[in-house]
Image: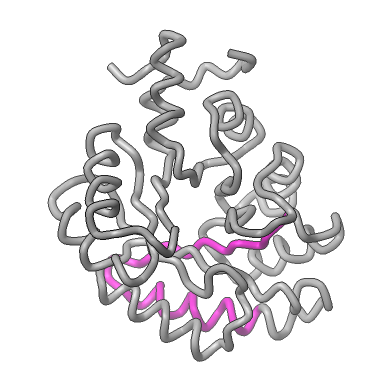
Amino acid sequence: MASESATTGNDLASRIDHTLLKAEATRADILRVCDEAVAYGFHAVCVNARWLSVVADRLHETPVQVAGVVSLPLGADTTKIKEAQAKEAIYAGADEIDMVADLAAIIEGDGRYLLHQLMTVLRVCRTMRPPVLLKLIIESAVLTQEQKIFACQIGRQAGVDFLKTSTGMHPAGGATVEDVRLMKETAPQCRIKAAGGIKTATQALALVDAGADRIGTSAGVAIIEEMREHGRGIH
């Protein structure tokens, strides 16, 4: 395996947000993902709002967290809509929120709009007990270097918990080592979630080495099985 990382299968599994965001996913699919997350020791299960209560029920009394998405995949909803989506997700059982940033605000350099939106949703997350984590998806593959830095700076200023590379749904692409490294350097106070196109253990380990604290992927089982094949699996 082409990585110098000493990360084990257990370490990597504990960083994975096991994700199923396909519109055609059924209840059986969602329950399978939940059971896989428990069996493999993944950090969280990330699903659309429609399934959050199902996931919360299935994962009750397990260490696996529940993550819900807001404004996926475009990020173009108004602040009031994003605020309402975040509240609904949390009331349905979400421990963490993955919200897509307003890309127009990033591209136009409208820091005032972006910061207000982030602070509004963050306020919802912070008033919960325990507080709910907020991950800001910047869709890094779409942005220029300057725009990525701007988005990270505003996210850092707002105080979001995580900066996340991608939705995994944009044709421009997903996570890259270069983007993870840039995001970590620009906003060292924020944790970094790499997501989008992560299918192999080699990719995941490279992203962790670059500074990713969390990995969002629908291929978590295959990744950990690959680790096992190379003698670095879950014991």
Whether residue 114 is visible here, answered yes or no, is yes
The residue lying toward the viewer, choosing from 71 and 63, is: 71
Pinpoint residue 208: horizontal percent, then vertical percent: 58, 33
> In terms of image quadrants, where is residue 224?
top left
Task: Tell me if residue 82 comes above or below residue 138 in the rendering.
Answer: below
Q: Residue at x 40, y 73 (%)?
A: 126
Colour style of the rendered protein structure: one colour
Task: Tell me if residue 147 comes above or below residue 126 in the rendering.
Answer: above
Task: Tell me if residue 70 comes above or below residue 29 in the rendering.
Answer: below
> In terms of image quadrants, where is residue 100?
bottom right
Q: Residue at x 74, y 55 (%)?
A: 172
Pinpoint residue 198: horizontal percent, then vertical percent: 57, 39
Q: Is residue 121 magenta?
A: yes
Pinpoint residue 68: horizontal percent, then vertical percent: 39, 65
Q: Residue at x 66, y 62 (%)?
A: 138
Name the quadrant of the C terminus. top left
Task: Describe residue 100's horizontal placement relative to residue 181 as left or right.
Answer: left
The residue lying toward the viewer, choosing from 126 and 77, is: 77
Q: How many marks?
A: 0
Pinpoint residue 128: horizontal percent, then vertical percent: 31, 74
Q: For the view shown, which residue lies furthest in the bottom direction?
A: 80
Task: Tell me if residue 62 comes above or below residue 24 in the rendering.
Answer: above
Q: Which residues are magenta?
A: 115-140
Q: For the view shown, which residue lies furthest in the front direction?
A: 24
Q: Is residue 173 magenta?
A: no
Q: Residue at x 63, y 71 (%)?
A: 101
The residue lying toward the viewer, choosing from 181 and 39, is: 39
